[in-house]
Image: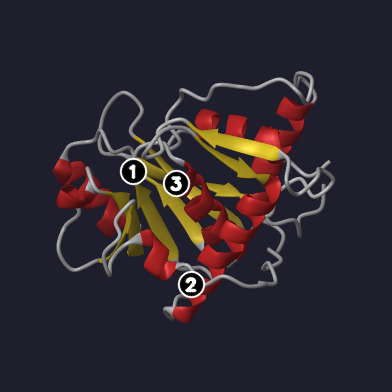
Amino acid sequence: MSDLFNLGDLVDRSAASDSIALIDLGAIGGPREYSHGDLDAAAQAVARGLVARGYGRGDHIAILAANSADFLIAYLGTMRAGMISIPINHKFPAETIEFILRDADCKLIFTDVERAPVVPEGYDVVVFRDEGPGGFAMLLDPGPFETVKPGAGEVAMFLYTSGSTGRPKGVPLTHAGHLWVIEMRIKRRPDPDHRMLVAAPLYHMNGLAICKVRWRRI
């Protein structure tokens, strides 16, 4: 696996672009299907939108939200743009969330309507499933985007963990290192026609890894 492969560019382009890649069971109005092409285009739109707002390579972008397709799209798009994704456990107390945001020097926070009130003042915020000016749709900038090629050892994300005691600590995960995790899971992947229910939270490495296995480029 090349160190120059971006973790946010995992869409399986060997699959038909209109084949189903993801079903969001929590979507407003009922389950919503996303094709491989939908995910690819949406991740590009996030990357373009972040760059258009003035964010650059290496900036830390947080995600504080429950599981959703928007969560995954924001996660992929952030890394495609060469920025570092920081999924945060939304079950942490408010003071712990505020500590992580400061500790990680987050520049922007993706959140959802339910978690938005927890975000401290002073941050640039984008809200999933919000149709207003601060909503996710307003960030998206559809169009082509050239995925940033990460260098060897370049960090893709920070996952915060507290272990059994103490304040959470950020664990840096590189593009190459987490791609190895995906490759190991792919070796045990079931038949491509099978569907997998991801109940694990996406702020945890296991939930993220399971989702990536389903659209990994083969």
- Callout 2 amino acid: Gly
Residue at 59% x, 34% y is 211
Q: Position of residue 100 (x, y in %)?
A: 28, 50
Residue at 38% x, 55% y is 62
Q: Is 26 or 198 nearer to us in this picture?
A: 26
Q: Is residue 130 left or right of residue 5?
A: left
Dot 3 crowding, Cα within 10 Å, few <14, some 14–19, many 20+: many
Residue at 68% x, 67% y is 147
Q: Which mark is residue 49?
A: 2
Residue placed under numbered mark 3 in the picture? 71
SS at badge 2: helix
Q: Earlier in the sequence, mark 1 or mark 2?
A: 2
Q: Which mark is residue 65?
A: 1
Q: Looking at the picture, does residue 215 appear above or below residue 193? A: below
Q: Looking at the picture, does residue 204 appear above or below residue 172? A: above
- In which quadrant of the rendered image does the C terminus lie? top right
Q: Position of residue 103 (x, y in %)?
A: 30, 56
SS at badge 3: helix
Q: Position of residue 143 (x, y in %)?
A: 62, 72
- Callout 1 amino acid: Ala
Dot 1 crowding, Cα within 10 Å, few <14, some 14–19, many 20+: many
SS at badge 1: loop
Q: Please identify the quarter of the rendering in which residue 161 is found.
A: top left
Q: Is 95 or 47 nearer to us in this picture?
A: 47
Q: Do callouts 1 and 3 mark residues in contact (Cβ within 8 Å)?
A: yes
